[in-house]
């Protein structure tokens, strides 16, 4: 196998044209085997095999620096930069992450996982190169889908006025995660149709030189194009047209389903998603009902509509009441604010890790205007995605310190529905609902009114009060059970609101409680429990704030995280007993 | 006077062409008089007089909805929508805010103060209109400078694929706050030079129809243009070329100095900035010295370089070691991360209110990568800008809950310099320094090492410990003085780090202290003091967390804020005594 002998990009450069073709076949086959067994980003990697080989053939990494946007397409890059074993040897599959990672290799410049950042990051490298009087090429690789993000625009616009070497490879596979959205994609289509000759050229309008490559999966064509721009002294875009999922028929045909995949049958493409309940399905059904019941409801998503169970049929069915804005979270929040101001009922949903894109829009565009939009923050908590760049543990701390925003944390599906029902129809303030990873049910009646920050006492006890937020409610119940074994009849409280303190209730606990323990599925720094601690600060109530220590955890399992942070019911019980 | 009889836009529509011209003269004269006496945004308002009159002549606000970006150019709009008295009558000057404000008028759609948001917010209104089957025009007004912000791009890109009425008026005065930066501005210049005929058209590349108006300060030309696009069924950009500061010679000539101004002499333009020290001047001198001493230092700003004392001469002097990225805070942070990774020493500075644009870039692009860039967060605290949209009280809560970031809060100029010196040269992690509004000096020696979160005990006492962060240090001293009168010898601590807890020191306080009081110039929710409260939660130490309650304060004076939040030394002392 050629691949086994590629220890660094220098080994790629030694290959002749035929061998490069063979290498591509090997890389693609290896990708398919690992992806089918392990899961991961299928389409983006299969589409970039030839371009990655050509990049490493032409440029000299790490002297020349390549920055991959999102870096979910960097698997071939990893194979060609000394990490092939992590793809060839099943026992080593987890030796590498699914994104670029400077700890793994000098060929990886940044840890990246969110979209639309590569141009700015790479421009920093190019500017450092120039300031230090060094030489070398800097190449940002960015997909067409990522171009819709504002950060990418800001980077391109700034780069467009530099007079220096800066190469942007636009990997145009005509897809975002779902289909692309934005007027820009009309002019990209014109560029493809005209072989790059259309006058309507976004990149040129930002000051870039421009080169179009129709055969974005042909190694020799790509090598010629990259050689043309190598050592360019001006910012230049190389627009390559590639096929997402290339080489795997079902991934070529159903690009959205194989953008990222769990392990699948390499022959048939069968993905065993199981038949259990998922929040995607639950939200999809719920939101579609809302849409049908009320023509003013508008569901907004930013490029990952599958996260709320909106696949092609649902999107079609929803018609104008569903808007995918593309990867444009800032715009999505402002759009929702405008919709609410205009009397519609917008529901914007995105994953916890991606709402991070919108702090200022939440604060200024939405909350300072107090427009009653609804946000659904999905995949929240430490028990889901665990890549450093996709941790969903910071949303509470980011959102609850913004005035006017009510952040509701349901303990189960039924409570989530009650909260969403209330949030969508009220006109008092912006409301967000934190949708966890796990699906829990509770067979109790839930309030229909969430107009005021009030915690719910589910069981009255004494001595110890457990305030268990959202999906950590069940953990609170488990702690109570442990405490019961020690003869302590703990009070159990469902606070519902992460965003405020029920002062009256907390005050009342002082009468017959000595310790309050708060539980939250996220970092405690800036989060829910610290506010309870501050409330009780001047009193003699003891408070234990339980959640995750502020840290960029890297692929740590949920079980490990709980153990490390003393979140297991026995550990919590131990700490409560110590405080008593 | 015509203006006195303009009670609503309907009154504008009654005027003939000559009267409209006279109205413009009156509006401009009134603006100059109020601005010279009161201060405010000079250039943006003077440039938009004719366009505002034409907008209200052609469109029918509030049925037609106009959304002004930043809304710092909305003074003429306010005059024509029933609020002329607030400009004509000096005693009523403060009856209106400097931005659009829905509480003031049904003609104001949103409270806006940050840039680049109008397109998204307006698109929300347009979409709500369509969903509800209503009619009317929606118009977003945006300046050329604001186009560099990613949110504006995201909005334009999304709007470009709508098939509905949506009008974007691009007010091109060839200026941001300082000069424009970005490749985009090259193509805007081409559009101006070609009377809109250049093929290199950013707006068309995003799917917009396009109309160019060279005479952007001519009412009849503008009326004709707006009539042309009125009731358009497609998104269209009307690109108007205006003169910033029109009618005031010194404002036309020195656009940056009169973008916003304190009161000035209407004849000469003289602005009495006083001769006291300012952080602008201090930072300007400091950063220029750094630049000269070390060729690797790169100072970055996003469009308000005067905030760090970088005016035209300084910018020229700094050469390649100064980068103004335009209004593009997200890019600025990512660029800084790239520069640090590449071995340069980037220092990015922006105001506290604008760093809000970059939560995700701080977290992902900078801190997850742990690149040692330096950030200077200026104008921080409640004693500076007090418009709701420009509050500088949320930065601690936003930043200190992000892992890896050290947020240093100096108590005075000398300590700030010690911290900046350390931050710029270290390579351990990203570091931010919180630059307050007030200039204080302390004649003591400061540490040169800030590698570890350690608080500094400045005076050892007992019973009460005062942990006074940053510019609230002097307030802590005042509290200690009050407590001394009560016979309490309080410990005084300068924590230096807003971003971490010195557990060892806090632990040691338990021996002979009963109450700890924390002071911070920002909202307490998510901020510094809550972490101290959480640390002491399981112990019997009492903690008072002092700062501002989470709220969107609106033009509340600092004295009032302190009183309301019980931050005056006597109030704090009272609360401490109550807790003892």
Image (cartoon, coloured by chain):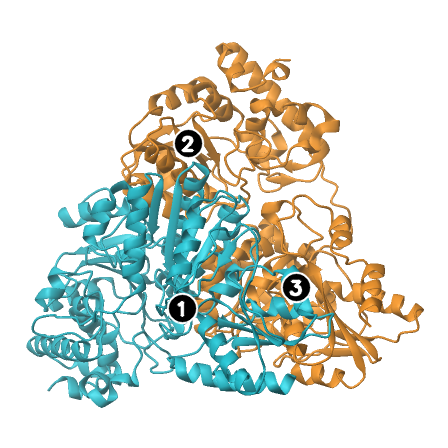
Chain colours: A orange, B cyan
Q: Is residue A209 above or below residue B433?
A: above
Q: CA distance from mark 1 to mark 3?
A: 25 Å
Residue where numbered disc 2 is placed: A139
Q: Any mark on residue A30, and which?
A: none
Q: Residue at x 25, y 59 (%)?
A: B177
* Chain of the residue where label 1 is placed in the rendered structure: B
Q: Any mark on residue A286, and which?
A: 3
In this view, the residue in front, A204 or A476, is A476
Residue A48 falls left or right of residue A284: left
Residue A368 shows in the view: no
Q: Please identify the quarter of the rendering in which residue A387 is found.
A: top right
Residue where numbered disc 1 is placed: B125
In this view, the residue in front, A91 or A213, is A91
Label 1: element kind: helix
**x, y percentage for residue A552?**
61, 49
Circle 3 residues within 10 Å: few <14, some 14–19, many ≥20 = some
Q: CA distance from mark 3 to mark 2?
A: 44 Å
Q: Residue at x 47, y 43 (%)?
A: A145
Task: Using the rendered image, report if marks 1 and 3 lie on a common chain.
Answer: no
Residue B268 shows in the view: yes
Q: Please identify the quarter of the rendering in which residue A459 is found.
A: bottom right
* Chain of the residue where label 3 is placed in the rendered structure: A
Label 3: element kind: helix
- Do tag 3 and tag 2 residues touch (Cβ < 8 Å)? no
């Amino acid at each position: 196998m050629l691949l086994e002998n590629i220890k660094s990009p220098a080994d790629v450069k030694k290959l002749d044209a035929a061998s490069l073709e063979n290498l591509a076949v090997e890389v693609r086959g290896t990708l398919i085997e690992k992806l089918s067994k392990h899961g991961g980003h299928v389409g983006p990697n299969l589409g970039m095999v030839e371009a990655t080989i050509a990049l490493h053939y032409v440029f000299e990494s790490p002297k020349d620096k390549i920055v991959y946007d999102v870096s979910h397409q960097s698997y071939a890059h990893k194979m060609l930069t000394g990490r092939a074993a992590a793809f060839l040897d099943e026992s080593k599959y987890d030796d590498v992450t699914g994104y670029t990672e400077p700890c793994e290799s000098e060929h990886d410049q940044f840890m990246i996982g969110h979209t639309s950042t590569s141009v700015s990051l790479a421009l920093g490298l190019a500017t450092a190169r120039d300031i230090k009087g060094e030489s070398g090429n800097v190449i940002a690789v960015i997909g067409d889908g990522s171009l819709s993000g504002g950060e990418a625009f800001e980077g391109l616009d700034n780069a467009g006025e530099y007079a220096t070497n800066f190469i942007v490879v636009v990997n145009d596979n005509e897809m975002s995660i779902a289909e692309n959205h934005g007027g820009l994609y009309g002019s990209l289509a014109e560029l493809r149709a005209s072989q790059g000759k259309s006058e309507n050229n976004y990149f040129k309008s930002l000051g870039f030189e421009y080169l179009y490559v129709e055969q974005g999966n042909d190694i020799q064509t790509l090598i010629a194009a990259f050689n043309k721009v190598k050592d360019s002294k001006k910012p230049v875009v190389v627009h390559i047209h590639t096929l997402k999922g290339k080489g795997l028929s079902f991934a070529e045909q159903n690009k959205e389903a194989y953008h990222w995949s769990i392990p699948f049958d390499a022959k048939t493409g069968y993905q065993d998603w199981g038949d259990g309940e998922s929040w995607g399905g639950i939200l999809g059904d719920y939101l579609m009902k809302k849409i049908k019941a009320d023509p003013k409801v508008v569901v907004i998503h930013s490029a990952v509509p599958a996260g709320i169970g909106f696949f092609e049929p649902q999107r079609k069915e929803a018609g104008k009441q569903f808007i995918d804005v593309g990867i444009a979270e800032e715009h999505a929040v402002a759009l929702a604010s405008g919709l609410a101001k205009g009397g519609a009922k917008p529901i914007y949903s995105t994953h916890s890790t991606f709402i991070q894109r919108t702090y200022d829009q939440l604060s200024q565009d939405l909350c300072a205007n107090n427009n009653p939009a609804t946000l659904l923050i999905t995949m929240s908590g430490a028990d889901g995605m665990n890549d450093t760049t996709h941790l969903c543990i910071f949303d509470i701390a980011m959102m609850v310190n913004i005035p006017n925003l009510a952040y509701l944390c349901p303990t189960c599906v039924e409570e989530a529905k009650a909260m969403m029902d209330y949030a969508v129809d009220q006109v008092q303030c912006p409301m967000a609902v934190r949708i966890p990873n796990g699906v829990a049910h509770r067979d109790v009646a839930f309030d229909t009114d969430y107009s005021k920050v009030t915690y719910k006492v589910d069981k009255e006890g004494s001595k110890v009060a457990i305030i268990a937020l959202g999906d950590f409610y069940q953990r609170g119940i488990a702690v109570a059970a442990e405490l019961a074994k020690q003869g302590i009849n703990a009070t159990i409280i469902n606070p519902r609101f992460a965003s405020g303190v029920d002062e009256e209730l907390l005050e009342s606990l002082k009468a017959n409680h000595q310790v309050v323990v708060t539980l939250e599925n996220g970092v405690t720094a800036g989060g829910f429990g610290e506010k309870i601690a501050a409330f009780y600060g001047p009193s003699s109530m003891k408070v234990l704030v339980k959640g995750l220590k502020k840290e960029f955890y890297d692929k740590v399992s949920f079980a490990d995280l709980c153990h490390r942070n003393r979140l297991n019911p026995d550990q919590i019980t131990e700490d409560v007993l110590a405080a008593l």
